[in-house]
Image: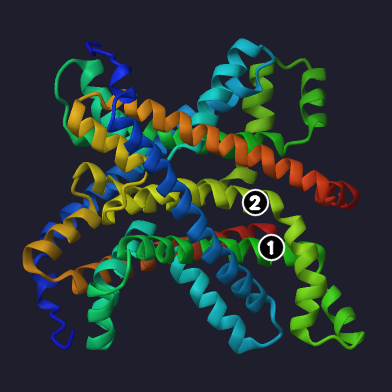
Amino acid sequence: MNYNWDWGVLLQQPYWGWLWSGLGWTLLISLGSWVIALSVGISAGIARCMPNRAIQIVASVYIEVFRNIPPLVQLFLWYFVFPELLPDALGLWIKRDLPNPEYVTAIVGLGLFAGARVAEQIRAGIAAVGIHLLPAALATGLRPLQAFRLILLPLGLRAVFGPLTSEFLITVKMSSISLTIGMLELTAQSRHIENYTFHGLEAFAVATVVYLLLGLSVTGLMRVIDRRFGAAKYRRASS
Amino acid sequence: MNDFDWGVIARSWPFLAEGMALSALLVVVSTAGGILLGLGLALMRRSDHAFIAGPATVYVTVMRSVPLILVLFWFYFLVPLVIGRPVGALASALVAFVLFEAAFYCEIIRAGINSVRAGQTEAALATGMRRSQVMRLIIMPQGLRAMTPLLFNQVIIVFQDTSLVYVVALRDFMTTASVVASRDGRPTEMYTLVAVVYLAICFSLSKAIELYGKGRAR
């Protein structure tokens, strides 16, 4: 292999700065889409378990559609197709006046994709702690939503803490596909450095290490939280 | 929007079919190669020797924590360097896919093997079988039953993943559609078509796996 390694290039400006800003955008996209994924996913997960047939079907359709279309295609649908389907005035506003359209599209697209996966986890969590708690909760006089909010969700969320952590890490990795609509996140910036310096492998190596560290620290942090809040203990007791 | 032109799909159909063929090739090669390499990695990770299990664990952890797009970029530049001459995007993408998906197949296979109770191994060893025989005749047949739904599920994920070769300008189904979309100025029709086709294929496959799993549980 004939490659002239030169790590010094990365320490020069502007390349070092590019990597930093790339990391910043990766975090912003991941966190933004995770907020959407959690709120939509928890709502859809609860809706999926509701005793009402119509609500169940709506939630299932959302989950199946958003899980079975590749996230890249979803992103393109939101970016290129969605504004065309809206009434003219609104479509024009999105195309012309929406601040930071690529970022908004990225977090909505990735968030709704991850939301469908989160919904499945939430449903599994509620099923694991026992949907049979629902009639008991209703018998105490709670309304269905209260029963989910106060009884099933707190228990169910703890049961799926580990899978949700994996889903978050998948979202972090998925944030890289936003480069296709022009977000300059970490992967895009390392590709960018290759274009300018022909020292792409060094930039890819740094990006790889950053993703790895990000993954390991999130996993470590979540393990600590899991232990602190007694969910790990709860799992041990139930198994 | 009011002039939805379905003709563009009919006109570009042969081109799109070529794209779908490339997607299928990527799925087949990365699944076959990924399972083979993944099996090797899974067996390595089960080894008692740290210098055999260690590298496999590091490999799987690294591959599982980086985005596929970054891996595609890596091999897009690395493969020609290693071989010493340009090899084209397809060869690089195939290498990247096999090496990337192997890490995921490894974890599925490992979980399948671990689902077989330790008593089975002990009993088989007590009958006088060698370790390799125990794995081949006792553990694998049972583990395989546990891992098949997950393996099929991973094939669906791989199929969705293949759309990402867009970033190295390889003409799979997604990329051919986007080429037509920008050439004919018809993004609405093309991306809607792409979404519907992926949805139909992935949804029916996942339902089939679900039914298969249910049928077996009975």
For disc 2, the marked residue is A163
Chain under label 1? A
Chain under label 2? A
For disc 1, the marked residue is A124
Residue B21's x, y, as percent?
Answer: 22, 50
Identity of the amino acid at label 2?
Pro
Foreground: A108 or B201? A108
Q: Secondary structure at mark 2?
A: helix
**Which residue corresponds to the image point at 47% horizontal and 63% vertical from the top-left?**
A111
Q: Secondary structure at mark 1?
A: helix
Classify 10 Å Cα crowding around label 2: few (below 14), some (14-19), many (20 and above).
some
**Which residue corresponds to the image point at 14% horizontal and 19% vertical from the top-left?**
B85
Which dot, 2 or 1, sits closer to the camera?
A: 2
Examine the rendered structure and indicate whether residue A84 appears above or below residue B172.
below
Foreground: B86 or B125? B86
Q: Quadrant of residue A72?
A: bottom left
Q: Along the horizontal axis of the image, is B208 left or right of A162?
A: left
